[in-house]
């Protein structure tokens, strides 16, 4: 009996149909039409942010460069808002008010390290088709899954805490009749905003964030170059950025402490997970040329977006240096005395004193509007990061608004209780506590990221080269060393906050 094309023919001329061969051929053809990357166990791997994955089309390789760049523009912008959230504001304001431009180079250095790490994160997502959380789940020992996941969730809640406080303070400053306690409750309704945005797609989320980032940058441009009575000295600015006095820096514990705070508030651990997932929202062809193009334009997108974040952070520091440096207190028209010291709540201090010091009420108004935009933009990206972490580590999928509600309640409830007991003056204490949590979680995201990015087996031809290898590991080492150096003081401050001292 012979087998010809799936038909069995015997010597008498009869024939029968071989179903097994055609079943195999049909299976192969159908799988070729649905090319999903298998996970380590051979099953089809779930994608991150399923409703947004591969939804943005990119032009053909021969299209004009500006069209290609615009197609890839967006993920870096979403990540950048984490580098100018309310937690950054407090440290930048303190640095400028106490030390003028001496720590401007630290803002530049932390932004540069952030660019290196975020570029590596984007490349990991493009090369492997997985985000950082999925890589940790699939390639690290199984026992690390729960500790990594829980530490990520705690860090995201801590970051959400800073966003709640920033938005709540802005609402309270813009509408004084709304108490800070009520303003914290109002921030819980932004879950409706996120639900609407995710239904409209990735491009609408990116457009919304672009409007908020432009608002923040525009407010600070007006503050410094239009309203300010004392323009910053460009020569002194350049010296603070490019020629720091390193001996004086290392001999001043106060300078080092604030510098650690700036770096800890700048590089956000959840952004490393988020970026590796966001780059997969582009529908990139699975060939080497397309992947290289995606890497190139995502690198440009990240660099441009985080450079904008650097200018915003630098503007906050410069504004504080121009307005507050050299003052120790200010008596308001109401008779209230506002002191400028290391323990001040710098966000509220800035709002209360910018108008009298700069001679116009618009200064405080612009500050509050920019702060509200900062808190709301960070809210959106924090929620997306929470989804990435949950789906990546645990492969749990829940409706985005439910995820948002759970995260927000976990941050709002302790905040309301804390403010109800300690009063409005506890805002700065809570910001300090959130930054301590973030700095402790950061190495758990950085080192796996660099480990995977260096692997030829995981990254293939897109494995990072010597430049990113050196700068990435150097950034990890420096940030971790500064975290360890500042950890005793940070834990002391955190305990003081929790104990109510």
Image: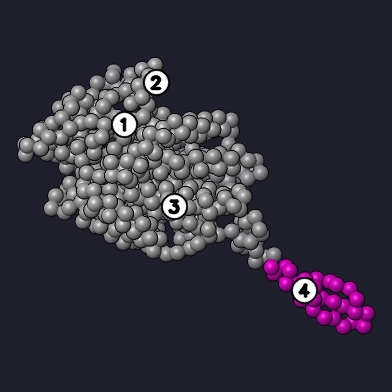
In screen coordinates, is 414 left or right of 224?
right
Q: Is residue 359 above or below residue 237?
A: below
Residue located farthest toward the right when viewing the structure as drawn: 11
Residue at image coords 34%, 59%: 409
Label 1 crowd (10 A; few <14 / some 14-19 / many >=20): many
Q: Quadrant of the N terminus?
A: bottom right
Q: Position of residue 450 (x, y in %)?
A: 56, 39
Q: Position of residue 326 (x, y in %)?
A: 19, 23
- State the residue in front, 8 or 201: 201
Contact (Cβ within 8 Å) of mark 4 with mark 3 = no
Chain-order first, disc 2 or disc 1: 2
Let me know if residue 18 is in the magenta part.
yes
Q: Which residue is mark 4?
A: 20
Q: Position of residue 297 (x, y in %)?
A: 48, 41
Contact (Cβ within 8 Å) of mark 2 with mark 3 = no
Q: Which residue is mark 2?
A: 250
Chain-order first, disc 4 or disc 2: 4
Chain-order first, disc 4 or disc 3: 4
Q: Which residue is mark 1?
A: 314
Q: Quadrant of residue 399?
A: bottom left
Whole-number angstrom distance, CA of label 3 to CA of label 1: 29 Å
* Secondary structure of residue under mark 2: helix
Q: Which residues are magenta?
A: 1-27
Q: Which residue is mark 3?
A: 153
Whole-number angstrom distance, CA of label 4 to CA of label 3: 49 Å
């Amino acid at each position: 009996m012979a087998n010809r094309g799936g038909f069995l023919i015997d010597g008498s001329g009869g024939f029968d149909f071989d179903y097994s061969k055609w079943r195999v051929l049909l299976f192969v053809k159908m799988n070729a039409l649905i090319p999903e990357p298998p996970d380590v166990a051979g099953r089809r791997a779930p994608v991150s942010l399923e409703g947004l994955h591969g939804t943005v089309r990119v032009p053909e390789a021969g299209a004009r460069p500006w069209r290609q760049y615009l197609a890839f523009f967006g993920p870096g912008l979403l990540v950048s808002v984490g580098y100018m959230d309310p937690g950054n504001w407090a440290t930048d304001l303190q640095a400028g008010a106490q030390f003028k431009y001496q720590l401007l180079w630290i803002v530049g250095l932390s932004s540069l390290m952030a660019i290196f790490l975020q570029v590596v994160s984007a490349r990991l997502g493009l090369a492997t088709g997985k985000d950082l959380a999925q890589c940790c789940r699939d390639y690290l020992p199984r026992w690390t899954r729960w500790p990594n996941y829980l530490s990520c969730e705690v860090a995201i809640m801590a970051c959400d805490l800073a966003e709640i406080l920033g938005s709540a303070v802005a609402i309270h400053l813009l509408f004084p009749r709304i108490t800070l306690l009520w303003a914290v409750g109002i921030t819980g309704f932004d879950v409706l905003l996120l639900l609407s945005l995710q239904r409209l797609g990735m491009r609408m989320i990116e457009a919304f964030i672009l409007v908020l980032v432009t608002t923040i940058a525009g407010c600070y441009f007006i503050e410094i170059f239009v309203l300010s009575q004392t323009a910053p000295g460009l020569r002194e600015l350049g010296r603070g950025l490019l020629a720091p006095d390193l001996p004086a820096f290392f001999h001043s514990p106060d300078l080092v402490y604030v510098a650690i705070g700036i770096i800890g508030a700048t590089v956000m651990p959840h952004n490393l997970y988020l970026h590796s997932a966001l780059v997969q929202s582009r529908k990139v062809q699975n060939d080497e040329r397309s992947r290289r193009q995606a890497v190139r334009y995502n690198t440009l997108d990240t660099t441009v977006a985080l450079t904008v974040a650097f200018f915003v952070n630098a503007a906050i520091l410069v504004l504080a240096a121009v307005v507050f440096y050299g003052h120790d207190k200010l008596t308001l028209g109401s008779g209230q005395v506002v002191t400028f010291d290391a323990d001040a709540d710098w966000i509220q201090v800035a709002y209360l004193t910018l108008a009298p010091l700069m001679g116009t009420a618009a200064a405080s108004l612009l500050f509050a509007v920019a702060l509200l935009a900062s808190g709301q933009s960070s809210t959106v990206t924090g929620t997306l990061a929470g989804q990435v972490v949950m789906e990546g580590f645990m492969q749990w999928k829940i409706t985005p608004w439910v995820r948002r509600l759970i995260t927000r309640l976990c941050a709002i409830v302790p905040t309301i209780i804390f403010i109800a007991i300690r009063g409005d003056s506890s805002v700065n204490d809570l910001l300090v506590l959130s930054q301590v949590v973030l700095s402790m979680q950061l190495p758990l995201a950085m080192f796996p990221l660099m480990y995977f990015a260096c692997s030829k087996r995981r990254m293939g031809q897109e494995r990072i080269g010597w430049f990113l290898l050196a700068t990435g590991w150097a950034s990890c080492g420096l940030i971790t060393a500064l975290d360890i150096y500042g950890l005793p003081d940070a834990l002391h401050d955190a305990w003081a906050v929790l104990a109510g001292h």
